[in-house]
Image: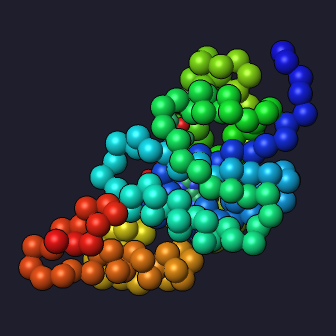
Amino acid sequence: MKRAVARHLLYPGSFDPPTLGHLDLIRRGHALFPSLTVAVLRNGGKNPLFSVEERVGLLRGMTRGMRGVDVASFDGLLVDYLKRFRAPVVLRGLRVVSDFEYEFQMALMNRKLDPDFEVLYLMPDERFSYLSSSLVREVARLGGSVSRFVPAEVARRVHEALRPRGAGAKRVAGKAPV
Ligand code: COA
């Protein structure tokens, strides 16, 4: 096994939208590693609320002032993207037991693809263990406030993105409702 000092933490995800749970994990990861890249997945295959560029912008706003933290996007295999970094370690959150099965499968597949693949799991604060981006989208879509679940600017943008503009308004990620 190759031994190297791990210098860079990489936090991949879809972040549609980024939540206070994601921010909690970024803070925890950053407390352990001086440099951290939040990487927004491009080829997510979901029907996104925000474009990748919008999500990158939201995450940059959330992490402004955190030295050593940057935000990027990637597509293709995670293990290929990791090759750009020196001795990278992937950060993932474990909120509830059910996360474990998915993460376990993903980690082992990644390790099959690249034997050097290494991942660090951190638990977000229990206040956020129920939180997910799709629940935030659903609450907002059904008229509830999401201000307790996401940073203020993200809440504003979520509500703005979902605000109906006339009957039949439909939003395409990155564009105003038409
Ligand atoms: N707080 C709040 N919500 C959290 C959270 C936290 N700390 N951690 C995860 N979540 C939520 C997310 O909001 C998301 O919610 P949603 O499903 O309701 O939208 C859900 O948990 C999934 O988390 P996310 O981090 O977005 O992971 P993902 O499953 O969408 O993406 C990748 C995981 C990006 C790491 C993975 O798909 C990947 O590596 N893709 C690249 C292609 C590849 O290499 N494939 C082979 C992998 S074996």
Task: Residue lying at the far left in this picture: please name it.
Answer: 167
Quadrant of the drawing holding the C terminus: bottom left
57 lies above or below 141: above
Q: Position of residue 2 (x, y in %)?
A: 85, 18
Across the whole image, how many numbered discs are drawn on residues?
A: 0
Quadrant of the drawing holding the N terminus: top right
Q: Position of residue 66 (x, y in %)?
A: 76, 67
45 lies above or below 38: above
Res. 132 in view:
no
Q: Position of residue 58 (x, y in %)?
A: 53, 68
Res. 84 in view:
yes
68 lies above or below 169: above
Rendered residue at 18%/68% (across/down):
170
Q: Quadrant of residue 62?
A: bottom right
Rendered residue at 44%/82% (across/down):
156
Looking at the image, residue 61 sits to the left or right of residue 34; the answer is: left
Looking at the image, residue 145 sits to the left or right of residue 147; the answer is: left
State the scheme by which the image is colored. rainbow
Q: Quadrant of residue 31?
A: bottom right
Q: Position of residue 96 (x, y in %)?
A: 59, 53
Looking at the image, residue 99 sits to the left or right of residue 158; the answer is: right
Rendered residue at 80%/51% (across/down):
35
115, 39: nearer the viewer: 39
